[in-house]
Amino acid sequence: MRRAFTAVLGAASLLLAMLVAVALPASAAPGTLGEAAAAKGRVFGTAAAQGHMGESAYATTLDREFNQLTPENEMKWETTEPSRDSFNFSAADQLVSHAQARSMAVRGHTLVWHSQLPGWVSGISSRDDLLGVMRNHIAKEAGHFAGKVDYWDVVNEAFQDGSGARRDSVFQRVIGDGYIEEAFRAARQADPNAKLCYNDYNIDGQNAKSNAVYTMVQDFKARGVPIDCVGLQAHLTLGNVPSDMQANMQRFAALGVDVHITELDIRMNTPADSSKLATQANDYKKVVQACLAVPRCTVITVWGITDKYSWVPDTFPGEGAALLFDDNYNKKPAYDAALEALGGEPGDPGDPGDPGSVSCAYTRTSQWNNGFNGQVTITAGSSAISSWTVVMTLNSGQTISALWNGSAGTSGNVVTVKPVGWNSTLAAGTSASFGFTASAPGGNVSDPSVTCGTP
Ligand code: G3I
């Protein structure tokens, strides 16, 4: 009897153990930025460029991690209305469809900005003409995307650093101070459901420029000019998250607008090293924590998926490494820090791009007119690994004609490479490499995208 009871108890505890094992993953902390942000009632987005969407690692990382997309350049005036009243939304339409198909929110960027503005607009000198042109641009563009765009950066970067005076632009010169509210009124008319934001950089902390924006928003709210949100771009430098960022967001929220972090990146002098990456991780954590502490801070968007395509090195030579994924789409310490700050949990060792498991780097070692040699170096993270897998996506027309120190399987343009045996086990921090020759009869010798993981 006692034996039978023990057996029943044993079976019951086995069943309980199975239930717990099944239940745990369901209650486990979210494993991606978008999931973790959603669990906190926020969205976590990125800027994305249509020109990179054909690169599988780019699109895969976008789709896996982010639940909001901002077209990086495709909605700007020079692209959408290159000549008067002639509109082209094709690149932006593709990005918006991609986002919609995956239930990502969309941020429209941007309707009125002094930069990336076509020459025909900059040349207008009559107030009535420019006002008409601006209203028409907003009506057509915001009208085209109505129902598909969740937030619009209606006016971008209208104030000067330092003084907080209005920035000189054709709109400011020809229309005068009133151009901003005219733009917001036109946007509300074109899309009554999108949240309408004013967006700027260096307004992340409290300073003369953010004070000027604050005064404008206060005035708009008092006079019923339609404004729903303020975008803090947050293009930051290493170790310099403003200590009053949370207080700054809170004061905007108190005016009755949402606050969005719209273009977050934290640049450093390159090359990166472990100490700079640790500082950057702490900086990202501070920004996420500041946002979570302000209920009306509802959106965090980074300005790009991978360091490979960031705007930073073009604008600030010698600086870069500002984003959450490195050039090879490996997760950086800043990724884990942002995810943890959102209440998520960095993935199991072996997840693609997890720095706790393995990282990889690609180098083109030589090239000729219809082919090239490449080398991939795989490096174990903070603990030893017993095996690794590298996935290379070749570009159009490319095939692998030889591969050494690795064992390859090919499916279409995707080549999966495993160790050959002797180079399988790697102690923490040590590396193995394999090399290959690619044929490119069409002359397309551009680099494949490379991702890695374990096993
Ligand atoms: O598309 C052309 C290409 O045909 C040409 O061969 C190439 C040669 O330079 O230029 C390409 O255009 C570039 C474009 O990005 C697309 O890559 C422009 O030169 C380049 O100036 C442009 O830079 C963009 C920049 O805004 C323009 O001001 C960056 O990608 C974009 O990240 C950046 O984003 C801005 C936000 O909109 C507003 N806040 C600041 C942020 C960073 O500057």
Image (cartoon, rainbow, N blue to C red):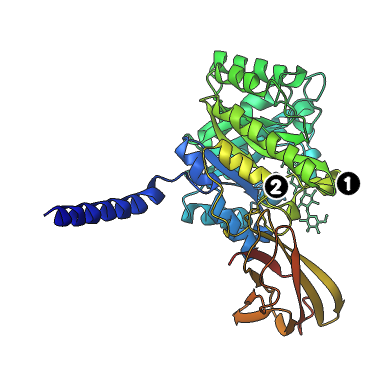
**x and y percentages locating residue 144 in the rendered image:** 54, 47
59 up-or-down from 318: above or below:
below
> Can you say which quadrant of the picture contains the N terminus?
bottom left
Tag nearer the camera, 2 or 1? 1
Tell me the CA gap for discs 2 and 1: 35 Å
Question: Residue at label 2?
Answer: 84
Q: Measuring from the top left, give residue 439's x and y in whole percent.
A: 76, 83
Residue found at x 75% / y 37%: 279
Q: Nearer the viewer, residue 266 or 384?
A: 384
Query: N-terminal of the two: label 2 or label 1?
Result: 2
Q: Is residue 109 visible?
A: no
Decide if residue 418 is on the left or right side of residue 361. left
Which kind of residue does numbered mark 2 sit on? Arg
Q: Residues within 10 Å of mark 2 (few under 14, many from 20)?
A: few
Label 2 element class: loop
Name the residue type under label 1.
Pro
Tell me the number on the disc at residue 317: 1
Instruction: Name the residue: 77% across, 20% down.
Output: 164
Q: For disc 2, does the CB lie below 8 Å from ligand 1?
A: no
Can residue 298 be seen from the camera position used here?
yes
Residues at circles 2 and 1 in contact by the CB criterion of under 8 Å: no
